[in-house]
Image (tube, helix red, strand yellow):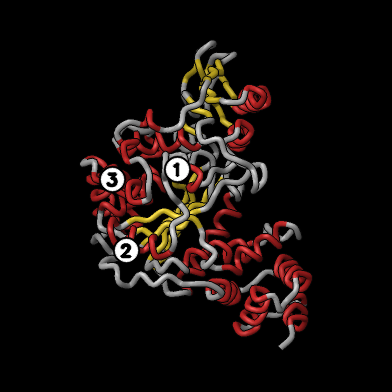
Amino acid sequence: MRAVDVIQKKRNGEELGRDEIAFLIDGYTRGDVPDYQASAFAMAVFFRGMTAAETVALTESMMRTGEILDLSELPGPRVDKHSTGGVGDKTSLVLAPLAAACGAYVPMISGRGLGHTGGTLDKLESIPGFRVGLSLREFRDTLRRCGLGLIGQTPEIAPADRKLYALRDVTATVESLPLIAASIMSKKMAEGIDALVLDVKTGDGAFMKSFEDSKALAEAMVRIGRGMGKKVSALITDMEQPLGRAVGNALEVKESVETLQGRGPKDLESLSLELAAWMLHLAGLTTGLEAARARVRDALASGAGLRKFQEVIALQGGDPAVGDDTARLPRARETVELRAEAEGQVAGIACRSVGHAAMLLGAGRETVDSRIDPAVGVVLHKKVGDPVRRGESLMTVHVNDRSRLEEATQRLRQAVRVAREAPAAAPLVRLVLDR
């Protein structure tokens, strides 16, 4: 078999077999297939697409280039959640401990933020001492001890994905639905899980801005997961405005702790509870979805979720006292209030602009090598539909470097639209794919 023949077949719009896809992916990972041929393959997929069977085969081939975690020794169902990312999207910090407190094992392998979206690892690393770089042995031990582990992708997990993603980034082939879906699912399927809940964002702050594109991605990932024998459902959720009120790493940890204490923003609490309920439901821990919802609400009300979060923080080297006193988290040297210049109702918040402003302050990365300032960010005091008076604070900007402030505040001022009347906010959960 030759790589050029596989590329030509896909270029001509023909369906590739599992062995052909595995040959190309294995060869590229080993270095036998050069970058220029892998680039040609990615571009052929970009223009010709892939069938459902091809996409499953691509995902399996990428997954099998690395270690597949064997967590069968854990005495309970293993389930995870994956989000396609957004602004203020901190649900993992709330739902993972809630699900673990209800008896699920949650082996969560997360990513870092890039551009306007935040990353779970960056948020966790704002907790003093917290280690996301556990070895796989340490990860398994943490899971055994508390039912929850929160780490970054290791070199052993789906190395083909890391190599192929870097190539796609410089060959204009990032926006390919089969390649996106296979990239996400190859890592998730390597976690040794039984079930997966997908939170696919849609709207201005999402990776996929249109509902149709978000739905297509969700459907592709659900097909892959089920094609690989896993229980997978997807929720398409709204990202037309930031989730919760905090955008920025330590600020989002603080808000997550407050949510686990039962006093967080209602949108964050509601979505976290719903996603956690789906995790329990797919894991088979309850007799139905309503029972799962009741169980996670109980875990929140009793404080079991917060205690589980503190437990995993301690096991991963962090300061569990942040669960009682969020003042122990990094704090910016200065805060600046942005006040309303008109009266009315908040008619819209440009989600992507808020994310970019937080990045400019230092909360996110412009490039993969950018350093993160854990303390900076934005806290919104108004959301879509809220009434606002002239001179009232719309948001508080947390800043350490004043040279970054002007451009960030300019973006933030432009992000909030005040009108006489506001449209009704979109529902948080736009669609559930469960069939």
> Looking at the image, is mark 3 or mark 1 earlier in the sequence?
1
Is disc 2 placed on a helix, strand or loop? helix
> Looking at the image, is mark 2 or mark 3 earlier in the sequence?
2
* Viewer-nearest residue: 158 or 388: 158
> Looking at the image, is mark 2 or mark 1 earlier in the sequence?
1
Question: Can you identify the residue that label 3 sits on?
Answer: 305
Q: Mark 2 or mark 3: which is in front?
A: 3
- Residue that appears at 38% across and 44% down: 318
- Residue count near mark 3 (Cα–Cα under 10 Å), binned few <14, some 14–19, many ≥20: many
Is disc 1 placed on a helix, strand or loop? loop
* Viewer-nearest residue: 6 or 377: 377
Amino acid type, label 3: Gly
Q: Mark 2 or mark 1: which is in front?
A: 1
Q: Quadrant of the C terminus?
A: bottom left
* Cα separation between marks 3 and 1: 15 Å
* Cα separation between marks 2 and 1: 22 Å
Residue 90: give its label: 1
